Amino acid sequence: MSNTQADPGYELGQKESTNYINASKGLMSWLFTIDHKRIGLMYLFTIMATFALGGFLALAVRLELFTPGETIMGPDAYNKVFTLHGLVMVFLFIVPGIPAALGNFVMPLMLGAKDVAFPKLNLASFHIYVIGTIMALYTTLDGGVDTGWTFYTPYSSTIDSQVVMMTMSAFVLGFSSIFTGLNFIVTIHKMRAPGMTWDRLPLFVWSLYATAIIQVMATPVLGITLMLLAMERIMNIGIFDPALGGDPVLFQHFFWFYSHPAVYIMILPGMGVMSELITTFSRKRIFGYRAIALSSIAIAVISFLVWGHHMFVSGQSAYAGMVFSFLTFLVAIPSAIKVINWSTTLYKGSITMDAPMVWAFSFLILFTIGGLTGIFLGALGTDIHLHDTYFVVAHFHYVMMGGTAMAFFGGIHYWWPKMFGKMYKEGPARFAAWTVFVGFNVTFFPQFIMGSRGMPRRYYDYMPDSGYQIFHQISTVGSWILFVGMLVMAVNLLASLKSGKEASANPWEARSLEWLTQSPPIEHNFHEIPTVVEGPYEFPIATATANAQGAESSDS
Amino acid sequence: MSTVITHHHAHHFYDKEQEASSAKLGMWLFLVTEVLLFSGLFVGYTVIKTLNPEMWKVASAQLDWVMGSVNTLVLITSSWTVALAVRAAQTNEKGEKNGQIVGLLAFTIVCAFGFLGIKYMEYSHKIHDGLLWGTKYFNHPDAIAAMKAGIKETFSLDVVALSDASFLKTLEAHTAAASHHGHELISHYASTVKYADTLMTVEQGHLFFGIYFLLTGLHGIHVVIGMSVLTWVLVLAQKGKFYKDYYTPVELGGLYWHLVDLIWIYLFPLLYLV
């Protein structure tokens, strides 16, 4: 612990009886707290509940597709279920996921700050998130929508369903996202401890910074887009309606101007978690710190210039298509910089396969597959064949679930001891991670194959003799394996709250500031603001002792 | 009103400077989101104008540029007075300028009321004439008449309604003649197409007014929010909260008000003059 001069007591394992969890009691002390750690926890549990909801909807979709024709629900119900699955997973789970839950908890600790810059705004962001979530669920009970999460016009502007209410829910959730992003940018600029230069920021913080830039700059455009869609329905303004002189493709431009950058809102924080996990469990300084940090910013910038690749077959000009295709290929460069630097960090490291690291390896493999298949879709010629097929579904699930969700779960396991002061059981945690990895591949790999053979996405049905059934069935079985893995993970984590071993201040022997305070941290994070004298990944050169310690912790 | 209440910074900041500069950065970021919120409507403006240039020309001429100009002056004046209020707070040594801050903020808020009053007059005139959004509301005899008059003035063309029996008969005759005799009546046919074009112009006037009401309506909401913020700042100033070491709310309220003005500075030429 030579990198700071603060709180030497924690190194000796001294613990205070009060921490942020037991400092005050009662429901109100949680619901109206302005402590970033408590807000982070409330986000975490709400977001995991929405993930469970989205997951059950996905299981229902997969079960329906097990056989041709009606299996468990009719076509109208199916359309609503897959729409809701998309909406819940995108707007309620994956966009807020890592930043609002893990970021809120860890980022101020990593900076050596007492809180985020605007604690009340942080609480407001959570309250708005809950209001938006309730609106979305209410809409679902009140008939639901079947437009898909993309709300494409003219279908969404003309059909008789609860589109207005659902778009308003997404509009409200957008405010929550903007407030989090704004708060994080100001926090990272202004709240760093003395000596915490930009060169010493943990890479998770860098990725949150890049994410926050996109949240602040893209989300307002989604807001106005959804408002225009609502106005189209309520006031009949005709801006997206060709019969009234408007342009339906304009909606797609607006929508993807937000929603493409939004996929980087989803993946960048996951990449940040990866950088922390890989370096800690390799016990090695990260390779190419500055390249990884700046590639996050590069991804944020380029993300605003590629939205047209969702519209190669929507009638935009061939010239525009070429430009968007080229820019899309450019995103591969910063993404590959990250993957290659992580791999190089692993090289000759003292790797221990603790549960967080198993999730990290899953990410590395699945995200690489997801990223490379994105190139197929970014290429103009192949996209015409693959557009709107299961290939697209498989691609973005490999990136979003195989990438972001794996990093999220890895991050939860990594920071769980810090959050609750308890260790989960390592065996079931690893079992869950490997089961999810297997189940994920069984679910989604067949979708690449049937997509390349022409199975369209979002379809309720397929012909019995079309050859798609076997792929659908493998995929559905995979979804059951996934479910088992998730269940084991949830039970194992929750059980640790009750019966887990006490966690030390720094169970992984990591080097960033959040491990300097006790687990769980005291109310104001640090007794004294730490003074930082070196970077976050200054691991001692791997020695026999370090290896022995690594082996010991992996045996526990 | 000569008292000064000393401001203490919140617990999680080191000092007042860190608190003030954080608040200012946060405000600038928020202003960025506001600009981007409007940007969607500006793009919608551009696309609809490009798709329907004739309609746009005729419809935008229906706006009253005199009222628009007066409102521009009102807002620019209010931007000036709010800037003076910030200056007064920054140079407020012993609370002797509290009254000045309050007065300048009050004048700014009065300007905002003036702006909304003039906007109300404009809106009620448009509602009276049926110059509104959407085909449902725009389909009003006065709106159609106003557009037709505008077309006659702008393009020197007479517009005949599709429902006009004699026009329909002419159209049919021209079409039939063209199909039977081919090229010889092509010039007549071309003039018919011109009639049809201008008819489209009349009918699609609703698109302009859709954009007009969305842009000015969203801006109007921001005027109201700005007024509320300035009123809150005024109440605090009345209590003597602001002096040379602490004036963040005055400054942030002022920044927000400048943004509200700035958006109008773009809206005025784009809607009234182009």
Image (cartoon, rainbow, N blue to C red):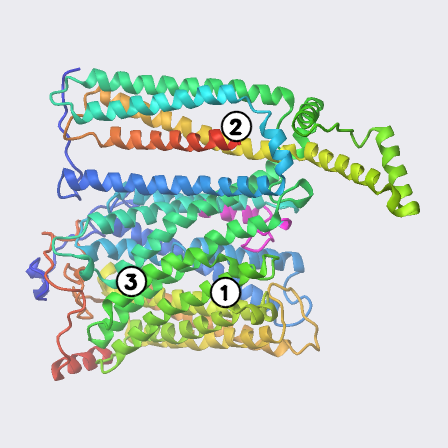
Say above or below: A242 vs A468.
above
The residue carrying pointer 2 sits among few (fewer than 14), some (14 to 19) or many (20 or more) residues within 10 Å by Cα, namely some
- Regarding mark 2 in the picture, which secondary structure is present there? helix
Relative image position of residue B229 (x, y in whole percent): 33, 28
What whole-number distance in Å separates the C-alpha atoms at marks 2 and 1? 39 Å
The part of the chain drawn in magenta is: A132-155
Residue B74 painted magenta? no
- Regarding mark 3 in the picture, which secondary structure is present there? helix
Labelled disc at residue A343? none
Q: Residue at x 27, y 75 (%)?
A: A354
The residue carrying pointer 3 sits among few (fewer than 14), some (14 to 19) or many (20 or more) residues within 10 Å by Cα, namely some
In the rendered image, which residue does mark 1 sit on?
A325
Describe residue A443's horizontal placement relative to residue A431 as left or right.
right
In the rendered image, which residue does mark 3 sit on?
A294
Residue A154 painted magenta? yes
In the rendered image, which residue does mark 2 sit on?
B272
Relative image position of residue A513 (x, y in whole percent): 17, 60
* Chain letter for mark 1: A
Say above or below: A105 vs B227.
below
Residue furthest bottom as drawn: A544
Residue type indicated by callout 3: Leu
